[in-house]
Image (cartoon, coloured by chain):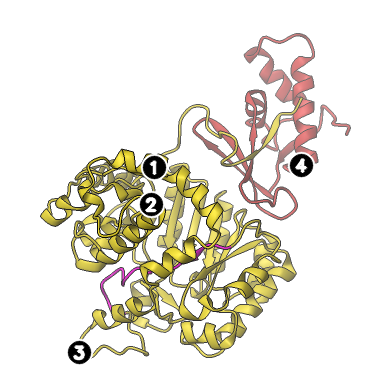
Chain colours: A yellow, B red
Amino acid sequence: MSYVTRRKLGEQPLWQHGQPLLGRLDIELTERCDNDCVHCCICLPEHDEAARRREMSTAQVQAVLTEAAALGALAVRFTGGEPLIRDDFEELYLFARRLGLKVMLFTNARGVTPRIADLLARVPPLELVEVSVYGMSGRTYDGASRRRGSYDEFRRGVELLLERGVRFVVKGALLPGLAGEVAEFEEWAATLPAMDKPPGYSMFFDLRGRRDCGGSAAEPPAAGCDFERRNETIRRVRLSPADGVRFLSRDRERYLKDMREFCSKFMRPPGDTLFSCGAGHGACVDAYGAVQACLPLRAPDTVVSLRDEPGSLRYALTEAFPRLREARATNPEYLRRCAVCFLKGLCEQCPAKSWAESGTLDTPVEYLCEVAHEQARDLGLLEPGESAWQIEDWKGRVERI
Amino acid sequence: MNIAADAVYKPSDDVVAREIEGEIIIVPLVAGIGDMEDELFTLNDTGKAIWDKLDGQRSLADVVTELSPEFEAEDGAIERDVLGLVAELVQRKMLVAV
């Protein structure tokens, strides 16, 4: 007889009596980053003192971690910006682990020092570290990060993780540089001990999530904060819808199999409900202490300030977010198109992306609409020239594939 | 593994025990206990009742004595469970002798 059960989360149910209020907390420890990636929707310069002063203090992060653990969270995700550039990263990491939280660390690995690698080996995060990759050479990586020498530092960081046996996975940002190095990237990724499947990619990049310019030295604002200039750079490096769909379906047989399964489950018009996603069922905290319903959703009216009073996470999860999830779209264009469009499952349109693009929660994002339509035409769900919101017999279309 | 009834045990500093929604979850803190991601340890109902009393103060014999009125069990069953759980937890480096 065994009294102790080793449980693999996701494969065995953990809870017999009821789910905890919070499963995982996501925290952006900082928006500052040692890279200045061309496509980044959030990064601020590493030495932006004004941003650093606004960030949550060590004690404030510890307080929110403590509340998350008290609400039953099993894990915390440390992301950014680049979380490793915070001076108190080690302290926060150990604090989270001593609370019994597993830590998911999202990093570019440039800041992985022997000391950090030793820490992660000695006190394992119990989650895979996730390393973002922007290129497989100094030319492509440094070109994307706009930081000379960043590729060498990334490779050094990754080597340290490998030497210490810290398990990590890599994911690629499909920028023009890495797009030409996919084979090399995937060949290398396959050699990493924790990579049991090909790496994932980001490719349909979000615009600036705070509708700000990010203070990039490479794109100084013309006057004030010219975030549209920065957004133009992001638009330039986004894949075209056709190229995106070609990339997604490059393993055609597997892609079609996955999409058949996906479409049978998730294709239907969302109606006027704005949040048909999981936003608000969990909680995210930004670098300055705002609790968000999801990481990208930064519209000021949708967040709860942690600094208002203790217990803000509970308040957000039990009162503010349930109210937010009841929000309905009112934009006539959204109601005419998105609300009745059966491609909702394929389309990444959501309030967060709408806000980043247009400053409202319910404006159709044309780029995402084009990507979803391109994908639908490729799958045979739509004929050329058709708009998905005009298809009445959408169930018949879904059954076709 | 021989576990003496007069021995005193406490949770190892190398694990963190959390009670969430009525479950005792044991989370490894340092390498060598359960380093694979997505893995945690839980105790069965018998284990939960015993774990709460392994506080570094009570001997295992005390634990058996305290648990006996709470459970209707055949002679020797509670002692077997206490010693069995402790042996398993010590082997997994989750308990240490005081």
Look at label 3 and name its amino acid.
Ala
Label 2 Cα crowd, 10 Å radius (few <14 / some 14-19 / many 20+) = some
Nearer to us of marks 2 and 4 is 2
Quadrant placement of the N terminus of chain A: top right
Q: Is residue A201 left or right of residue B65?
A: left
Residue designated by label 1:
A400
Quadrant placement of the C terminus of chain A: top left
In the image, residue A145 above or below residue B34: below
Residue designated by label 2:
A380
Q: Indicate the secondary structure of the residue bearing disc 1.
A: helix
Disc 3 to disc 4, C-alpha distance: 62 Å
| Residue situated in front as seen by the camera: A233 or A352 | A233
Mark number for residue A152?
A: none
Verify CB contact (< 8 Å) between mark 3 and mark 2. no
- At x 34%, y 81%, the residue is A233
> Is residue B20 visible to the viewer in this orientation of the structure?
yes
Look at label 2 and name its amino acid.
Gly
Chain where mark 4 sits? B
Verify CB contact (< 8 Å) between mark 1 and mark 3. no
Disc 4 to disc 1, C-alpha distance: 54 Å
* Overall secondary structure of the magenta section: loop
Q: Position of residue A284 (x, y in %)?
A: 38, 55
Residue B42, picture quadrant:
top right
Q: Is residue A217 left or right of residue A339?
A: right
Q: Position of residue B76 (x, y in %)?
A: 79, 14
Verify CB contact (< 8 Å) between mark 2 and mark 1. yes
Question: On the same chain: label 4 and label 1?
Answer: no
Question: On the same chain: label 2 and label 1?
Answer: yes
Disc 2 to disc 1, C-alpha distance: 8 Å
| Residue situated in front as seen by the camera: B41 or A383 | A383
Q: Position of residue A41 (x, y in %)?
A: 36, 72
